[in-house]
Image (spheres, rainbow, N blue to C red):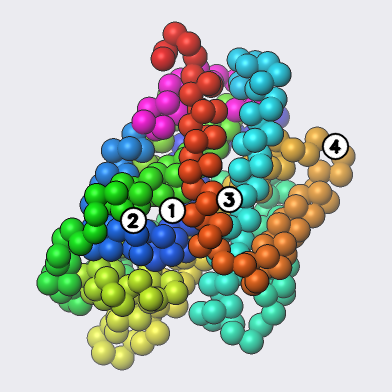
Amino acid sequence: MNKKIKSNEVLAIEIGLITALFPGIANTLILNTSKNASLLSVLIAILIGTIPLFMIIKISKNIKTESLKEYIIKKLGILGKILNIILITIAIFILFINSWLIIDFIISQFLTRTSYYFIAILFFTIIAYIVNKGIETTSRTVFVLFILISIIMIALWICLIPYINLSNLKPYIDVTTNKIIKSSIINTVYITMPLIYILDLKHITTDKENFEKTIVIGYITSYLIIAIFLFFLLSIYGIELSTILTYPVYALFKKIQILGFIERIENFAGIQIITVFFVQASYLIYYIKRNLIKNKNQKKLTYLIALVIPITSIFIFKNYNLTIVLKTSVYIIGSIITIITFLSIPQKNI
């Protein structure tokens, strides 16, 4: 029997896939690059991102019953096989970054005396177990978590309103145009470009007629979430403090006290951040498993992939600066995925 998921589950996966890296790169690249103009850089990124978004929708309209891999191979032949290997490699790289960010976040904010490797093994074993249960289980788990974190996120935003100080937003533009554009490109690559992996779900979506609409809604919603977080961050903490916070999105909620007696409310925000990391990691492992492993030992190899990548990321990033990796990879990844997406568009639709 064919495995099927619904468009609302696709939407939850998409938003998680797009927003997951934001908590880790918000200050590392975006805030340090565009300063108080970070909100403007996000607005520009939305416009730049419509180009790959438009191309992805064009491809989606021509995918009927085949997977993304099958579609690209059918259209491009041997070149398509090479491009699929590149897509898998980039998915592994994004998962590599995701793994370090989530492990470092849990250790630095919650379990400071716990082994990095213990968290990696525990967290990613759970993810591998869910992924091995199939896409229906993975997507339904993601959807339930999406509803949960949406409620938490909106409640926390409401609680943050009294702490807003609009004077912290001034000056609105305090960097050069080049830095604003650079920040916008970073946003586009790490936030918009992973959208191409959502196309692998088109052929198993029950309501395919809503798939392109779902992609657009997820795109707009994701950028809206990011813009709101940046607004709160800059208007509450100001740019100088925001840039030195390790996880500014998480630190944002340390300001909140509900009714004067509920403290440590940021733990709810921690659940939210961990959840979006979980969503992205789960889907990328699913994608890698589906397109890389084709034998009877698929489940065992899924566990192997789910453990080797985070353990390797710990070994490397405990001794190497993540910022350097992000800065050097952003243009390479952006260029490669743009080329792959462009080549995958049917000629008649270009």
Residue 11 in sight in this render: no
Classify residue 84 as left or right of residue 5: right
Q: Looking at the image, which residue sits at the far left?
A: 167
Task: Choose between 166 and 317: the one closer to the eye.
Answer: 317
Spatial CA span between label 1 and label 2: 7 Å
Spatial CA span between label 1 and label 3: 12 Å
Quarter location, residue 71: top right
Q: Looking at the image, which residue sits at the far bottom?
A: 261
Q: Are marks 3 and 4 in contact (CB under 8 Å)?
A: no
Find numbered disc 3 in the image and state the secondary structure of the residue it sits on: helix
Q: Are marks 1 and 2 in contact (CB under 8 Å)?
A: yes
Quarter location, residue 232: bottom left
**Mark number for residue 226?**
2
- First reached walking from the N terminus: tag 1 or tag 4: 1
> Which residue matches tag 3?
94
- First reached walking from the N terminus: tag 3 or tag 2: 3
Which is closer to the viewer, label 3 or label 4? 3
Spatial CA span between label 2 and label 4: 40 Å
**Mark number for residue 295?**
4
